[in-house]
Image: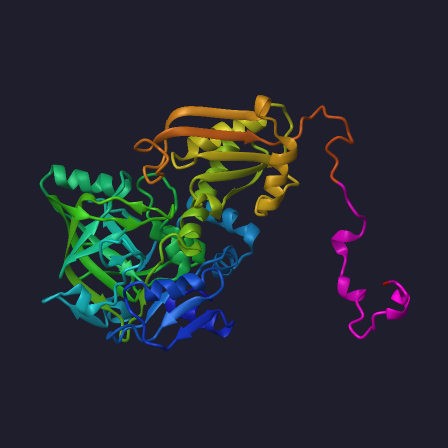
Amino acid sequence: MKARTFRTWLEYLHSKNRLAIITRKVSLQYEGAAVTKTMDGKKAVCFTQVEDYPIPVVSGICSTREDFAEALETDQLGIIPKFIEAVASPSPCRSVDSGAAPVKENIILADIDLMQLLPIPVHHEKDSGNYITAGLFIVRDPVTRKQNVSIHRLQVSGKNKLGALLLPRHTYHLYKLAEDAGRALECAIVIGVDPVTLLASQASTPFGVDELELAGALRGEPLEVVRCETVDIDVPAFAEIVLEGRILPHVREPEGPFGEFPKYYGPRSDKEVVHITAVTHRNNPMYYTIVPAGYEHLLLGGIPREASLLQSIRQTVPTVKAVHMSPGGTCRYHAIVSIKKRNEGEGKNAIFAALANSFDIKHVVVVDEEVDIFNMEEVEWAVATRFQAETDLVVVHNALGSKLDPSTAGGVGSKMGLDCTVPLNSEPMRYLRVRIPGYDNMNVEDYVNSRAVFPAKHGEGNN
């Protein structure tokens, strides 16, 4: 498969002229992020000379839906069904010995200095320091032995110390259980994995599901993993770099500000602290970073949310066709839903189901199935011609939303749904879209003669 490892995926992108190799020396502070941003949605970027580090820096490996579809070996319409199927049927990982795991080719157990070892960049103007943004954060439930995988922003706050933003989800739950018992929680931070495993890490699943097993299901083969050196965690054997460590109990230190997905800064506050106990990496490793608020960041969070959203709405409106978390809505706040309406009121039911799916969702637009929900001009047209606020607007006040949305009061604000579906009893011609017969199958090249000369004599005498 194209995306079996981080390296095979980069080789594939290079073969398709979708990987820009930057040989000019660049700075860790802003410059690499600025170059990556200019290529956002166009090409991945590999910087071969980053300040004085021998390690290349890579970013933007999947910055379009087409990229993720190719990595999953499907098309755009097949991404969500394939993701839902993987969530329903996880594939257990396959353990390998250290000798068969490239990530064990180099093992560092003493005198760890993260900024000496790795080219960890500064992305935004007001970021409080160097941040790891693309590390899979793996912890284990000591009772069930199941692992949990997520991505957290990680600020380098010392030679072997990271400040971590742990939102109140599965990792945080396991950490609080350990902290309440006076224990540190072991963890591993994995940098440089294939895009399928990266995408699986963001799945919205019930507590107790191991996202590495979802990666195996998406890949069609078990993911190969290896046990860490200093912690009881299994990590992808073909990863580029692994940081092993422990989240310390009853320790909080300042972290932030940091530029986040809404294109605003997350504030500075006291956060959990990770003490790094070991670093392992491949020979000639590559460092992977995600530029926050770019397409790669947004899609990585949005696509798994679409899978969860589609399943939630289907429980209420079985005829839901597709959902889209739009980039303009940060792939978190705006949901566009396509349904085949059979009963009046289903549009509003779809709105309520979408809002209940995630506290992040702020605005929901429901349209009929013939509207292309991935084309925002089509969606805006549906709002313009099929929506009346008096009858089609749903508003909920004082609801919990995203605390990173600066328009809320500490995360509490208003939410809105727009039912843009056509009334079932409308007159046949009232909402009939204009159509030109033959347009859908038109090949204009059959009509254009590139050698033809403009018939200028038809304009003679017309001054």
Q: Is residue 195 left or right of residue 154?
A: right
Q: Which residues are magenta?
A: 434-462
Q: What x and y, as percent, mark residue 209?
A: 33, 44
Q: What x and y, as percent, mark residue 298?
A: 42, 50
- Is residue 28 positioned above or below 215 on the image? below
Q: What x and y, as percent, mark residue 446?
A: 80, 65
Q: Is residue 337 left or right of residue 226?
A: right
State the residue lying farthest toward the top. Answer: 390
Q: Is residue 93 left or right of residue 351?
A: left
- Is residue 24 positioned above or below 95 on the image? below
User: Within the magenta stretch, is there residue 446?
Assistant: yes
- Is residue 12 positioned above or below 263 on the image? below
Looking at the magenta stretch, what is its main secondary structure?
loop
Q: What x and y, as percent, mark residue 273?
A: 16, 49
Q: Is residue 293 left or right of residue 127?
A: right
**Residue 144 falls in image quadrant:** top left
